[in-house]
Image (cartoon, rainbow, N blue to C red):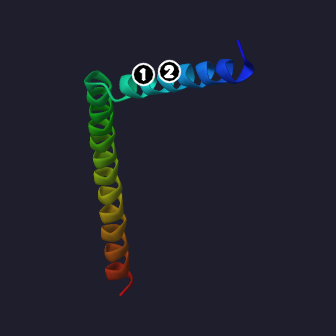
C-alpha cells in the first residue's frame, strides 16, 4: 500500500470512532443521566441558598435587636 492510502484509511477510521463516540455521548440514556444530575445539583443549590438566606435574616434580626438595645 502507498503511504497516502494508509493515511486515508487511518483518517477514516479515526473519524468513524469519533462519530461513534459522539453518538454514544448524546444517547438518550446519557442525556437522561445529565438531566438527573442537573436536577439534583439544582435542588442541592436551592437548599444551600435557603440556608444562607435564613442565616442572613437571623444575623439581621440580631443586629436590629442589638441596635434597639443600644438606643
Locate residue 59: give its quadrant.
bottom left
| Residue denoted by label 1 | 20
The residue depicted at 26 percent of the width and 38 percent of the height is 39
Locate residue 3: give its quadrant.
top right
Q: Quadrant of the N terminus?
A: top right
Q: Which mark is residue 17?
A: 2
What is the crowding at mark 2: few (fewer than 14 residues within 10 Å), some, or many (at least 20)? few
The residue depicted at 30 percent of the width and 25 percent of the height is 27
Task: Decide: is 28 above or below 70.
Answer: above
The residue depicted at 37 percent of the width and 73 percent of the height is 63
Q: Could you give the CA–CA distance between mark 2 and mark 1, rounded to whole angstroms?
A: 5 Å
Is disc 2 placed on a helix, strand or loop?
Answer: helix
Is disc 1 placed on a helix, strand or loop?
Answer: helix
What is the crowding at mark 1: few (fewer than 14 residues within 10 Å), some, or many (at least 20)? few
Residue 64 location (% of width, % of height): 32, 76
Locate residue 53: give its quadrant.
bottom left
Q: Quadrant of the C terminus?
A: bottom left
Q: Residue furthest bottom?
A: 71
The residue closer to the viewer here, 57 or 65, is 57
Q: Residue furthest top?
A: 1
Q: Residue furthest front?
A: 2
Residue 23 location (% of width, % of height): 37, 26
The residue depicted at 35 percent of the width and 55 percent of the height is 52
Q: Residue furthest right?
A: 3
Q: Are marks 2 and 1 in contact (CB under 8 Å)?
A: yes
- Is residue 26 toward the left or the right of residue 32 in the image? right
The residue closer to the viewer here, 16 or 23, is 16
The residue closer to the viewer here, 26 or 52, is 26
- Is residue 4 toward the left or the right of residue 13 in the image? right
Amino acid at each position: 500500500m502507498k503511504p497516502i492510502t494508509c493515511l486515508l484509511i487511518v483518517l477514516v477510521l479515526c473519524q468513524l470512532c469519533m462519530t461513534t463516540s459522539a453518538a454514544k455521548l448524546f444517547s438518550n440514556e446519557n442525556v437522561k443521566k445529565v438531566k438527573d444530575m442537573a436536577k439534583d445539583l439544582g435542588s442541592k443549590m436551592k437548599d444551600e441558598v435557603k440556608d444562607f438566606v435564613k442565616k442572613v435574616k437571623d444575623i439581621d434580626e440580631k443586629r436590629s435587636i442589638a441596635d434597639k438595645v443600644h438606643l
